Amino acid sequence: MNYSIRGQQIEVTEALRDYVDKKLSRLDKYFDAPLTSDGTVTLSVVRGLHVVEVTIPLTGVMLRAEDRSDDMYASMDAVVDKLERQIRKHKTKVNRKFRQEGSLKSLFVENTAGNGHVATLDESDEELELVRTKRFDLKPMDVEEAILQMNMVGHNFFVFTNIDNQEVNVVYKRNDGKYGLIEKA
């Protein structure tokens, strides 16, 4: 897989680029064929912390992991571990679905440990529990008003109807303290 590696407020040295390539090559063992999509790696320094973000688009799923610590290399290690957990979780879900449908072919290769046991996730990791449902009318407003409303209720995101295009949008507070807007494509 090809990765686009870029730095924000940091120069990406050749040693750092090699380390990123070496660590991300660990993920290749989970796939039957080389991936055709291009992943992105963003290395940055925010408020004295080294941040690594990796995004890998796959068919039907987007793998994304982020970590921040005092050391760029430690952040990279943590991100790869998070991505491996996501892949194993998705692989388990996909393989279970194929077994239920009677298909023998799976998207991911079986990862066997040296003892011959297949690495899988605990079934409890698959359980997603919905604990609350809210229903409310979406008031048409502009983005600035939505940000103010979000801050007033003390949430990290706010769903609203955008007055400019009459579409449902989401504003959210980013880790860097700025705001983001999610719109329908």
Image (cartoon, rainbow, N blue to C red):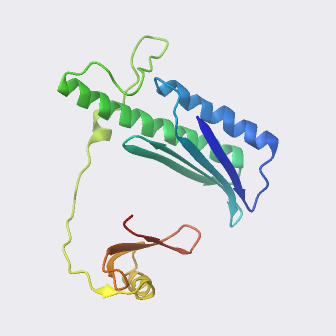
Q: Nearer the viewer, residue 56 or 185?
A: 185
Question: Where 45 sits versus 113, above or below?
Answer: below
- The x and y percentages for residue 176 are 59, 69
Where the C terminus falls, by quadrant? bottom left
Q: Horizontal placement of 116 versus 66: left or right?
A: left
The total number of labels drawn is 0
Where the N terminus falls, by quadrant? top right
- The x and y percentages for residue 134 are 20, 71
Residue at point 21% right, 64% down?
Answer: 132
- The quadrant holding residue 136 is bottom left
Question: Where 23 sits versus 165, above or below?
Answer: above
Q: Nearer the viewer, residue 83 or 69?
A: 83
- The x and y percentages for residue 76 are 64, 44
Residue at point 61% right, 35% down?
Answer: 24
- The quadrant holding residue 15 is top right
- The x and y percentages for residue 167 are 31, 75
Residue at point 39% right, 83% down?
Answer: 146
Q: Nearer the viewer, residue 150 or 144?
A: 144
Question: Where 171 sits versus 96, above or below?
Answer: below
